[in-house]
């Protein structure tokens, strides 16, 4: 994308707001933001790097919101973020060296598969009650959870889109952490490992800053609105985002063919 117009920047900000909202309450918002960047003409490698800037901003905004509401299990942050960050370093380094053409096909095909999975995956069940910080910390130390967190970080470093769904699975389905605490921990883990991934893409010169900043403005607004939003609506909105993603994927595929 060269010298985006005012209406393109406005659309990117709007897409960023929706993506920031969905990423905070459920996951899969980056399916939409990545497609938007590609549909506006950014090369796949640059779109992948550019998307990390709003992800960092929205994750920090959501983390501050959850902390303000007393829902963030602080003692578990370092333990959950460490394996995810190591995975993100490996994943982002790998992605930054993938040539444009293969990366474009990866973003079309793999994210299409992630979209289908997000469309069909059941909602993570609500737990009977919230755990205290010590209980959350103990569950984050479970070797199975550590492995899942590393895998989530590696995938998030490479592609990002849909990583929230993997993290919720790791923390709630595998770790047994209640959905509210798992969601709060998810956003801070994404914030930490996204700083690692974004640093790699920035160092490699794979960020379109004008598009990134426009999307960041919307993403922060969306994340702040999402913190206090009922989680019961998250799945419905996620389904809308996934459907839009699949339509955008079909457009991109037709363009490639």
Image: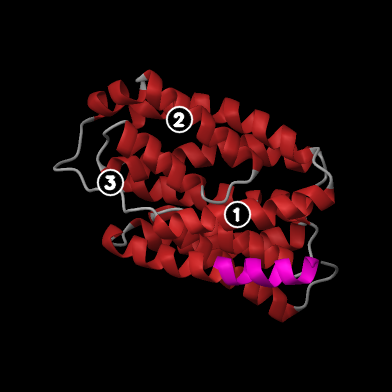
Q: Secondary structure at mark 1?
A: helix
Residue 126 place in picture, x, y as percent:
22, 48
Residue at 46% over, 24% down: 147
Q: Which mark is residue 180?
A: 3
Q: Is residue 232 above or below residue 187?
A: below
* N-term-proximal mark, 1 vs 2: 1
Q: Secondary structure at mark 2?
A: helix
Residue at 65% over, 70% down: 250
Judge whether residue 79 can be spotted in this image: no
Q: Secondary structure at mark 3?
A: helix
Along the line of sight, the residue nearer the viewer: 188 or 65: 188
Residue assigned mark 1: 111
The stretch in magenta equals 245-257
Residue 213 place in picture, x, y as percent:
68, 60
Crowdedness near tag 1: few (<14), some (14–19) or many (≥20) residues, C-alpha within 10 Å: many
Q: How is the image coloured?
A: secondary structure
* N-term-proximal mark, 2 vs 3: 2
Front: mark 2 or 3? 2
Residue 251 lies in the magenta stretch:
yes
Dot 1 and dot 2 residues touching (CB under 8 Å): no
Residue assigned mark 2: 148
Q: Is residue 3 above or below residue 107?
A: below
Q: Which mark is residue 243?
A: none
Residue at 47% over, 53% down: 117
């Amino acid at each position: 994308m060269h010298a985006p117009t005012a209406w393109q920047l406005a659309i990117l900000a709007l897409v960023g707001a929706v993506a920031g909202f969905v990423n905070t309450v459920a996951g899969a918002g980056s399916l939409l933001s990545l497609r938007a960047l590609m549909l506006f003409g950014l090369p796949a490698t640059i779109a992948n790097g550019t998307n990390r800037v709003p992800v960092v901003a929205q994750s920090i905004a959501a983390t501050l919101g959850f902390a303000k509401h007393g829902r963030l299990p602080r003692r578990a942050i370092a333990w959950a973020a460490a394996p995810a960050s190591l995975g993100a370093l490996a994943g982002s380094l790998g992605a930054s060296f993938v040539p444009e053409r293969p990366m474009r096909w990866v973003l079309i095909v793999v994210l299409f598969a992630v979209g289908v999975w997000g469309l069909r995956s059941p909602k993570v069940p609500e737990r009977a009650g919230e755990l205290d910080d010590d209980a959350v910390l103990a569950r984050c130390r479970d070797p199975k959870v550590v492995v899942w967190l590393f895998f989530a970080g590696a995938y998030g470093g490479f592609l990002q889109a849909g990583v929230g769904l993997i993290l919720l699975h790791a923390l709630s389905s595998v770790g047994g952490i209640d959905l509210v605490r798992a969601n709060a921990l998810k956003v801070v883990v994404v914030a930490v490992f996204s700083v690692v991934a974004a640093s790699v893409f920035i160092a490699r010169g794979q960020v379109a800053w004008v598009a990134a900043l426009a999307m960041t403005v919307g993403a922060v607004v969306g994340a702040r609105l999402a913190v206090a939003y009922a989680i019961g609506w998250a799945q419905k909105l996620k389904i809308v985002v996934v459907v839009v993603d699949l339509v955008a994927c079909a457009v991109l595929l037709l363009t490639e063919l």
